[in-house]
Amino acid sequence: CSYLAIMAALASEADYVFIPEDPVVHNWPEKLCKKILQERSAGQRLNIIIVSEGAIDRDGNPITAEKVKQVVVDRLQQDTRITVLGHVQRGGNPSAFDRVLGCRMGAEAVLALMEADDKTEPCVVSLDGNQAVRVPLMECVERTKSVAQAMADKNWELAVNLRGRSFARNLETYKMLTRLKPPKSAFDEQGRGVGGYTMAVMHIGAPACGMNAAVRSFVRNCIYRGDTVMGIHDGIEGLIGGHIKKMEWSDVTGWVGQGGAFLGTKRTLPEGKFKEIAARLKEFNIQALLIIGGFEAYHAAGQLTDQRANYKEFCIPLVVIPSTISNNVPGTEFSLGADTGLNEITEICDRIRQSAQGTKRRVFVIETMGGYCGYLATLAGLAGGADAAYIYEEKFTIKDLQQDVYHMASKMSDGVQRGLILRNEKASDNYNTEFIYRLYSEEGKGLFSTRSNVLGHMQQGGSPTPFDRNMGTKMAAKCVEWLVEQLKANTKPDGSIDAKTPETACLLGLVRRQYKFTPLKELIGETNFEQRIPKHQWWLKLRPLLRILAKHDSTYEEEGMYITVEEEMSTDSPCA
């Protein structure tokens, strides 16, 4: 299976990838060398070629890393090295996502076994999107065998499709994004885009990893279609100031692996500045807008949509990609950047736990970011093996704190001589990190010592994780498709855009097993604007699991659902 090769190629902007499901044509050496030469001429100094295990050409001849190296050395005289990853790919410490997945799947497997009897069909417990599912085992086996048969029959298209819709889409996306320049078919004889639309992209809110990957994907998908893309720098302030630049294919080269936000981002909302914003949208003829950001991006998009009756310039298709480490935007279960932030916290917790282990009988109280949203504290607690995680959504009293202190004391007496307590930054006004630290220090005298740690902005991460890179890439590609669809449906005979319905202003999010465009109007009722959090949050059902694994008494309810292999293969999951 070439899953690893394709996902690694997408996440690293690899120049070429060889996989068994979609073999290269017989003249691949010429194509490979031509592409490398063009990239070197454009100033690129490093080329990455990924060769999947079992890669072949259309005639079934094996393609090895040694063979590819020989082609490059003989034809281009380029210095070439082979790195065979081997068992290094199995990794060292598991990522936060894998740890949480292991906890969820393990609990689901126990519940599946408890429900089963001698007539129950064997099943595979897995994750589809963000939904735990149980798939019949024999159906999975048959599907795996059918892929091998399709490849033996040289039915390559069927082999790719049997891997699932996500695999096929990832392969298609990689082929499009890895081009050095857009196809000639995207422009007419005068060099103008044949698509004819002018779209813009901007950030609003705090920077988060994955933003740059989303912008790269959006820019190249638009240009590939023949449309014009405008990059708005520094959020709303940059839009009003006219810091708007036409973006070219080569402008976004190398953006996937970079953290932060190259376009620049600010938290400023459009309220009170609608007239100036409308004037700029008209000046640059912006016909569709993508906003990538956190709760501020969602709030700003809602404010612009509310003013459509007063400003015709706002009657354009508008879509938001939620991107914040806090994961506090309604309409989605995962935000861009949250996975990277979670990994940063988990790594820090690992180091702190190591320190506690060496000191013996040491408890650390750690404060995480997230505003009023307890996502980071809860999931990091699950991934880091915390004894407790205090959050705003789940009210706690002094009795709860006292009970946790007693639990910690009994744990120390039983031989586990370290402890980890997480607290969300706005979990409580009075029971703050300092208070909890002092409580544990006082009550633990003679049993354990306590230290506190406020993690701060290092949680925003350095380089985005592969999950955030690929999720940003896929979400931006979906946004382009959606915007074009809305533009075609709302273009008047005179060429002007008149998008007034609620369905033309949406937020793209992952909801259970699929990506979903939800109208912003529908999300208003699901939002707590005062605390800037959704009213319903999926991860709260994982709280009992956190308590159980920390040896507290709690009740965990199953989250899995039975589906067939066909249903699983038809969804476009960010994890696949």
Image: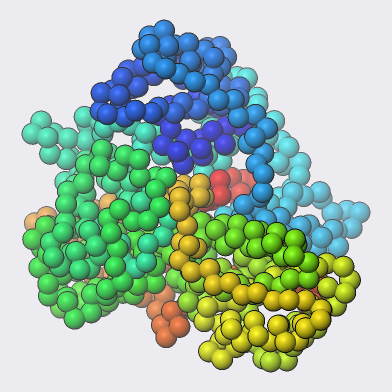
Q: Tell me residue 560's x, y (percent).
A: 70, 61
Relative to 480, residue 438 above or below = below
Q: Is residue 414 above or below residue 243?
A: below
Q: Quadrant of residue 176?
A: top left
Which residue is at the front of the view, 246 or 474? 246
Q: Is residue 424 above or below residue 182?
A: below
Residue for point 57% across, 62% down: 345
**Quadrant hosting residue 444:** bottom right
- Estimate the x, y position of residue 261 in percent, counting from the top left: 33, 56
| Residue farthest along the top direction in this orientation | 74
Question: Could you tell me if residue 460 is visible in this image?
Answer: yes
Residue 548 in the image: state x and y as whole percent: 78, 71
Direction from residue 287 to residue 455 in the image, left or right: right
Horizontal and vertical percent position of residue 310: 15, 78
Work out which quarter of the rendered image holds the C terminus and state it. Answer: top right
Residue drawn at the location 87% of the way across and 68% of the way down: 415
Report the residue at 41% width, 60% height from top: 208
Way the structure is coloured: rainbow
Which quadrant: the N terminus?
Answer: top right
- The reply to whether residue 289 is visible in this rendering is no
Residue closer to the observer: 538 or 16 = 16
Residue 435 horizontal side relative to residue 257, left or right: right
Residue in front for this viewpoint, 206 or 167: 206
Q: Residue at the spot x=74%, y=65% of the render?
A: 359
The residue positioned farthest toward the right in the image shown: 118
